[in-house]
Image (spheres, rainbow, N blue to C red):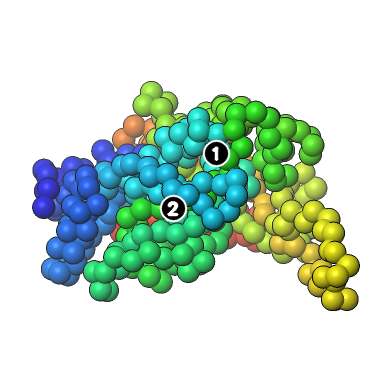
Amino acid sequence: MPEITPVPLSQLTTLRVGGTPQRTVDARTTGELVDALRDVWSTGERWLVLGGGSNLLFSDDEFDGTVILVRTTGIERLPSPNPGHVRLKVQAGHSWDDLVAQTVAAGLSGIEAMAGIPGTTGAAPIQNVGAYGQEIVETLVEVELIDESTGDVSVVPASDLGLGLRTSVLKKHYGSVPERSAVILSVTLELAQVGHGAVPVRGTQLRSALGLDADAAVPLAWIRETVLEIRARKGMVLDEGDQDTWSAGSFFQNPVVSAQFAATLPAEAPRWSMAPEPEADRVIPLDQFTGFVPPRVGGPAPVKISAAWLIEQAGMRKGFRLPGSQASLSTKHALALTNRGRATAEEVAALARLIQQRVQSEFGVLLQPEPVLFDVEL
């Protein structure tokens, strides 16, 4: 097993906090990753797989177990049963942002709006990563994973992963354990072959972020570049010299509430209906028409509201920090909790707790943390 000298988690995570594990394993092939997992599971010791370290908050205490670094890379192009599409099987340790860049360069559509999201491809389905209304659930076909309970490797369809808003059956939510303890070895996506010309932009949230009209058409490369510019302005693209990017990304999820509750918020509160895009008109040949037209689903759709807006309106502006603390809100985006150089895990947690309390007191909404927390309490 490729064991290396233990590396402090503060050097392996984008938030730059965390103690040193007892053991560190560097897995660069699928075989090494499988062997390392089966070995650590056979001992019953505590374990963690780590890709880009972009969605984690660790305690500063020693991690009493083994950290397995997932360094597997590679993309295999596969045929799709659907005309005009192609499938990509991507190894778990492959950089997600590099994957987005490679798909755009190949004229493949489906994940271009998720450019700049840090981390690895294997981590993407765990919390159903998404940005600007685009989520991996829209393109994910299946994952290859290994289960802790059996040590067996299997291929699991996306429909069995319980993919929802920043969640899946594989995610360790704050205060709970995953429904299924398993590690993703590879991810298979199905993307549309659209080429390099202008294409229509799906989704009102993405069009709004890009400043596009409903009938606008632009190249994939323009979408990716514009998303990267937007994210960079918010400090959401990793930059060694910018402490606003020393974060776990968005620390809180954008809440999804009922339409009735959303109506109680001030009119200026940003919100996005979760109603699906309306289907295009269908023409049914007369000889196939049965006389039955499925009824439309009634009732108002849930609404997603901006956690960043709630935080700022609760009195915590960009750059807010507690006295003497090295943890602060980003000076560019109120949804990112950042390390200003020497922050401890407890300083980050204290700021997060205050934000939760203020927002709940002001608006009656309890913000839920998006990162996975290890030995840290909110």
Residue found at the very far front of the displayed protein: 287
Residue 85 horizontal side relative to residue 301, left or right: left
Element type at mark 1 = strand
Tell me if label 1 and label 2 are in contact, CB under 8 Å.
no
Whether residue 254 can be seen here: yes
Residue found at the very far top of the displayed protein: 241
Is disc 2 surrounded by few (<14), some (14 to 19) or many (20+) residues within 10 Å?
many
Q: Residue 144: percent from the left, percent from the top?
A: 36, 59
At x 64% / y 59%, what residue is drawn? Answer: 256
Whether residue 121 can be seen here: no
Work out whether 305 lies above or below 224. Answer: below
At x 51% / y 46%, what residue is drawn? Answer: 86
**Quadrant where the image shows the C terminus:** bottom left
Q: Which residue is mark 2?
A: 188
Q: Residue 52: percent from the left, percent from the top?
A: 34, 43
At x 44% / y 48%, what residue is drawn? Answer: 78
Residue 322 horizontal side relative to residue 264, left or right: left
Sequence-earlier tag: 1 or 2? 1
Work out whether 279 lies above or below 297. Answer: above
Where is residue 312, by image quadrant?
top right
Query: What type is the residue that disc 1 sits on?
Result: Leu
Q: Which residue is mark 1?
A: 108
Element type at mark 2 = strand
| In front of the other: 76 or 224 | 76
Q: Residue 201: percent from the left, percent from the top?
A: 69, 39
Query: What type is the residue that disc 2 sits on?
Result: Thr
At x 11% / y 48%, what residue is drawn? Answer: 3
Q: Residue 137: percent from the left, percent from the top?
A: 54, 56
